[in-house]
Image: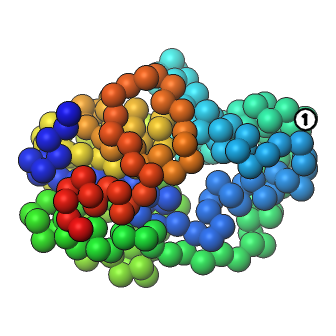
Amino acid sequence: MIDIKNKKAIFFDFGDTIASTVPTYPDRIRIALCEISFEFTEKQYFRAFQYADYIIYKEYFDDQIISSAIYQKKIISIILRELGINMETEEAWNHINRKMAKSGYKRQLLPGAEELLKDLSKSGFKLAVISNNDGKTTEKCEQLGIAKYFELIIDSTNVNIIKPDKDIFLLASEKLGIDTKDILHIGDLYGADILGARNAGIDTIWINHKDGINYEGIKVIQVSNLLELSGLFKLT
């Protein structure tokens, strides 16, 4: 069992871990795909999304090449295959991007996020964000009023490293001057967050919102939301 109270630093994923959009990023992809095919359920879609994230993790270790563009297009390619949607990846990708460009959405903190960050900060943990994002994670944290809690915010676009690459976690460890054994990473994606961080020697907690599958059967603490996570630290 992880002795989480004796960790020195806690890394958080950003999207769908401490903040989200309405609709969420995965939901916006699903909505766009629904214009192409109605032959899948919401549960089937989210299972395909999680599986795609996991397969990318596995393939990454085969060829050691990963980038934001590769990651995003591979996600779409695997989802199309898993859902049986007969469309070329590039065509689907262009359709999704057009749909997303026209969709308005609101960004908000997930329930319990600010209280959790405030309490963890007061308890002496060094907090950081590691996000696969568009280069604007710092600005997004500032807009939500939570940037003040983080000593470090790393955006994959800005450092040209994307989760599940262990180097993005090791970069954060180096910048904070804290050994990986003294760090805990919290995220919602099984492949990018949980397996990626573990490959860097970092313990993890999986925020498993969608009843995702533990494909490798690893021992990992799972919670369904931030309020449950606060209970692990006995902060509420």
Residue that appears at 48% across and 30% down:
214
Residue 215 is situated, as x and y percent measured from the top left of the image, at: 51, 25
Query: Residue 68 at x, y = what percent?
Result: 55, 46
| Numbered disc 1: secondary structure | loop
**Residue 30: image location, x then y, percent:** 75, 53
Is residue 151 in view? no
Is residue 184 toward the left or the right of residue 222 in the image? left
Quadrant of the rendered image containing residue 163: top left
Task: Name the spot of residue 111 as percent of width and height, x first.
Answer: 43, 71
Kind of residue at badge 1: Asn
At a point 33% along the width and 74% down the height, the residue shown is 114
Q: Is residue 173 visible?
A: yes
Lateral position of residue 14 relative to residue 39, left or right: left
Q: Looking at the image, which is closer to me, 58 or 217?
A: 217
**Left/right of residue 124 with respect to residue 115 in the rendered view:** left
- Residue 59, by quadrant, is top right
Q: Residues within 10 Å of mark 1 (few under 14, many from 20)?
A: few
Give the residue drawn at x 71%, y 33%: 78
- Vertical position of residue 12 compared to residue 218: above or below: below
Structure colour scheme: rainbow
- Which residue is drawn at the image coordinates 25% and 37% (left, top)? 202
**Quadrant position of the C terminus in the picture:** bottom left
User: How many numbered circles are shown?
Assistant: 1
Q: Which residue is mark 1?
A: 86
Q: Is the N terminus in the top left, top right, bottom left or bottom right quadrant?
A: top left
Furthest toward the top, the residue is: 62
- Tell me if 175 is positioned left or right of 71 in this view: left
The image shows residue 121, relative to residue 67, as above or below, that is: below
